[in-house]
Image: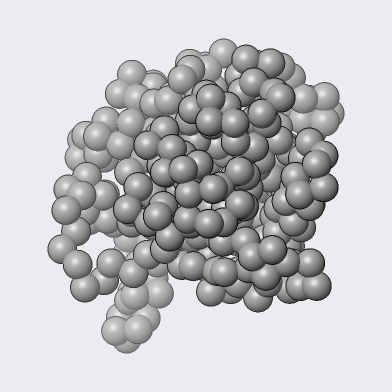
Amino acid sequence: MEIIAFGVQRDEKPLLERAFAGRHQVRSLDVRLNRDTAPIASGYEVVSPGVNADLAAPVLQELAAGGTRMIAQRSTGHNNIDLQAAADLGLTVSRVAHYSPHSVAEYAWALAGAVNRHLVRAADRTRNFDFRLDGLMGRDFRGRTAGVVGTGRIGEAFARIAHGYGMELLGWDAAANPACEALGMRYVGRDELFSRSDLVSLHVPLAEDTRHLVDARTLALMKPDALLVNSGRGALVDTSALVATLKAGRLRGVALDVYEQEAGLFHLDRSLDVLLDDTLARLTTFHNVLVTSHQAYFTEDAVGQIVEATVRNVEDHLAGRVPRDALVTPERPPAAER
């Protein structure tokens, strides 16, 4: 059988094709799956989209009409999929439940270090033979307070690194993680975490109760010289409120690997296009803001695990088994209803 995969990065392609070798052929496309590209999947029983695919009801209807029976998404988050529509269409939908938490946690710290020590500005200066230190002073992380919003596997990995730096740990989550408590983390209310932390890092999934978790009110609670890092989901942050906060001269630095309107931009070459997103354009003008293109997960280790989990889910489906990481099957309602 031939499987079609959308949103495949160049470095991901050989890993994906090698994992399916000897089992199934893979047609790898670098285009994003959305309403315009969905007709390409006509005749394919199994479709594997990337993290920024649009799987709203109209797209799922197009896929189902073309013969698709399974959506094997290559990511953990699934806020881009209309699970109820998938269930109504009799589709099987799977995700990747787990992959290396260290890939994201380590990258979040790379972002934090970069904005704290002004690494991008320093590198740009040295390329122009400007070796001054003006405006490049950072701060030690040791002895300061890290606020970890979401203390699951990634948040725990982030907290372990913070503990290694010698930071005080504050956590916020629906339930405490004993491993984080063993590091000395103290769980507090959300407002206290944002108001007391020198560094806030976001590691919660995107849901209705976490959408715009960081809004104008939350940003006003933060220390004027705090750092904010988001390597979770873009819509955790109200970007318009963030821009207003930065324009007011608040926050020492912001590092974003995700952006709430990233679909159709991230993972694509738009260098010759006019950027129509005024909010993103404004964000990139701040010297203390670093934006990257949703790459925190992008290590050989994590992508390898993502591919392996995707293969396992597909094999389960084709063998008539319920995939281990199924969100929806014809026999099971959406995860939110279970």
Q: In this view, does 30 lie to the left or right of 239?
A: right
User: Where residue 122 sits in the image (x, y, percent)?
Assistant: 39, 70
Q: How is the image coloured?
A: one colour
Examine the rendered structure and indicate whether residue 10 appears above or below residue 282: below
Q: Which residue is drawn at 48% across and 17% down?
A: 209
Q: Which residue is drawn at 53% across and 57% down?
A: 43
In this rendering, the count of numbered labels is 0
Q: In this view, does 19 lie to the left or right of 142?
A: right
Examine the rendered structure and indicate whether residue 44 appears above or below residue 90: below
> Between 181 and 59, which is closer to the camera in this rendering?
59
Would residue 166 be seen by someone viewing this image from the given angle? no
Q: In which quarter of the image is the C terminus?
A: top right
Q: Residue 205: which quarter of the image?
A: top right
Would residue 178 be seen by someone viewing this image from the given angle? yes
User: Where residue 225 sits in the image (x, y, percent)?
Assistant: 39, 38
> Between 326 and 65, which is closer to the camera in this rendering?
65
User: Where residue 163 sits in the image (x, y, percent)?
Assistant: 73, 41
Examine the rendered structure and indicate whether residue 17 appears above or below residue 307: below
Q: Residue at x 68, y 45 (%)?
A: 96
Examine the rendered structure and indicate whether residue 167 appears above or below residue 115: above
Q: Residue 26: which quarter of the image?
A: bottom right
> Between 178 and 47, which is closer to the camera in this rendering?
47
Q: In this view, does 59 lie to the left or right of 178?
A: left
Q: Which residue is drawn at 35% across and 84% down?
A: 127
Q: In which quarter of the image is the N terminus?
A: bottom right
User: Where residue 84 sits in the image (x, y, percent)?
Assistant: 52, 24
> Between 261 and 152, which is closer to the camera in this rendering?
261
